[in-house]
Image (tube, helix red, strand yellow):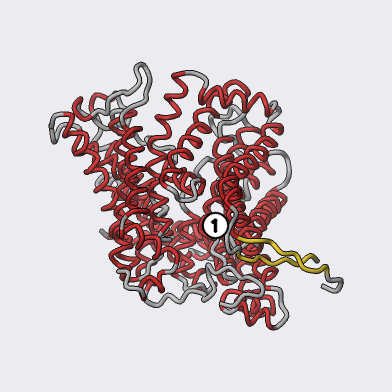
Amino acid sequence: MIKFRLEERAKSPYWLIILSPFIAILVAIILAGILIVLAGANPFESYYQLIIGAFGSKNSFAETLARATPIILTGLAASIAFRAKFWNIGAEGQLYFGALATTFFGTGLVVLPSILMIPFMFIMGALAGGLLLLPLVLLKLYYKVDEVVTTLLLNFVVVLLVSYLLEGPWKDPMSLGWPQGKSVIDEGVLPQILSKTRLHLGFIISIFFAFSVWFILSKTVIGYRIKSVGLNAAAASHAGVPIFKTVLIVALLSGGMAGMAGVTETAGLKGYLTLDLSPGFGYAGIAVAMLANLNPIGVIFSGVFLASIYVGADAMSRAMNVPTYLADVIVALTVLCILLSLVFVNYKILFFGVKKND
Amino acid sequence: MIEFIEIIFTAGFWAATIRIACPLILATIGEVLCERAGVLNLGIEGIMSIGAMVGWMTVFLGADLYTGILAALIIGGLFGLLHSIFTVYLGASQHVTGIGITMLASSLGFFCFKLILPASTTPPKIKPFQPIDIPFLSELPFLGPAFFQHTSFTYLAILVVIFAFWLMNSTPLGLSIKMAGENPMALEAQGIDVFLVRTIAVVVGSALMAVGGAYLTLSAFDAFYFGMINGRGWIAIALVIFASWKPERALLGALLFAGLDAYQVRAQQLAGAIVPYQFFLMLPFLLSIVAMVIAAKRTRYPKALLIPFRRGERH
């Protein structure tokens, strides 16, 4: 049996760090190509259709960027949290909580001129997302209740709450029986930024937040503390980093980002809250963050990449008769390939000896 | 008010409790195996989903029901192997690997389902396991319909649980698994391959999860729906913590939980007009969180949980 050992690299070569996400994507695409063959289609033509579907026209390109908007925000949510090894897998629920806040405040309760109304809704959405995470982070800090499971479980609770509100008290009477919320008032709607497309101001806002998060993480004391808690909480605590406060800030920032993804979808893309507002944007954020190696600027690019897979797969599915779930398979494979590439970047694999009697 | 108490004195309530508990028990025991060996398996939700799909599809394509269970077992084991290559042999993050496995297993299952049945709007049905009357016992009043008129899959699940107890508590392998999760260095010092022990635990545990998923499509229902696992995997993980990683407590926890779930379905019929159904559906998830909070004080994690073992390295 071949024995091997992983040895940590003192310093990973730069070319490997830069190249590794691309290799991971390539491997994921090749593996998914096998599935396309199984589906009886030509993989090259299918991927060509996918690229055309995502970037082939002004409209499709705009659609890709519009789809990237919430994914960038949930990707930032995961990046912040995972840096501190705070496993917030609840971005999906936080997104919907942000969407609930948008519907609560944005459909007539508060009327402000656009220039104030839009920031107000983003603040409320971020607060809602952070607020949803607050009891869970307190449970973790006071009682050591594992946040992975609690955040996952709460996603289901929130979706059921949205379902109740949309079928009951918050149902728009004008919606002809569909369970959907009232429309966001005109002052609150995020304006189009490319005529005759669905691309809206939310995209610019998400990029703004990517740079803000980058600034916080790499240029401020808070960012330094977040990183140190993630690397070694015990050592950080010994060095005087306030763990409690830092984890609390991480949770609020992370939940806030995911909450704002709910704002962009409700006030930007659709104009009202629906039960299918997010086809798993919260979970996609985890993939985006991993692909970007938790780097907030990288999240912009990996977010657009993932969005292009989702948008392009719809077009490919129509043209080639390959199920759209291929997009989810590619995303999942990318996550696993990235993990694999991280192992190779950080460790050397040393094989030693082939023993006969083993 | 008396109706709410009468519920628990109906045989139907107890029969439903067993039915709801079965997939949870299988998944929870599977997760206990993984975690006792030191590996958190967040792939559980996806592995249950693909187990449900593969088990159902095998039968739909003409095989018999037991072959369906076997197919689920194999696919679950394969995803367990993938998980262990990443987390055990390569030491990758158990959290992210698990989420990745869940994403891959469920999306791959949906992809294959759509590939084989492209245009099915109403999910096609199979003839699932039928209830078997156990001679004499099934004729007992109350006890008979409650406990002795279940499908053979149900009895099989109970056998599997007994097997898991025996494996964990009475075999050298069980002891090795527990040591791999508590003190892998000591296990290695005895000349036992920690990687191999952890891999066995994760593969067997994942296979059990997949069979738990298949219970839904082969015994509890007769069709496969997207999203039919609906958080059962995550609930199983909460139950593992609630059970302090002990299989016998996991069994009790799953039964208690299933009982509450069976109760809420019946209470919903009584109170449905007053309380919207969504609040009843929230209960399992909220109860799981409450269970974790209750267990938090006495929680004692396996010491080496989440810590990758590396040969020639000291912790």
Q: Nearer the viewer, residue B147 or B213?
A: B213
Q: For this view, does B104 lie left or right of residue A123?
A: right
Quadrant in the rendering for residue A175: top left
**Residue at mark 1: chain:** B
Q: Quadrant of the C terminus of chain A?
A: bottom right
Q: Nearer the viewer, residue B196 or B131?
A: B196
Q: SS of the residue at dot 1?
A: helix
Q: Determine the residue positioned at 58% across, 57% down.
A: A12
Quadrant in the rendering for residue A242: bottom left
Q: Position of residue A249 (x, y in %)?
A: 29, 58
Judged from this view, the residue extending furthest toward the top is: A196
Q: Quadrant of the N terminus of chain A?
A: bottom right
Q: For this view, does B284 lie left or right of residue B87?
A: left
Q: From this view, report whether residue A264 is shown above or below residue A91.
A: above
Q: Nearer the viewer, residue B55 or A155?
A: A155
Q: Determine the residue positioned at 64% across, 26% down.
A: A46
Q: Position of residue A264 (x, y in %)?
A: 32, 35
Q: Which residue is mark 1?
A: B23
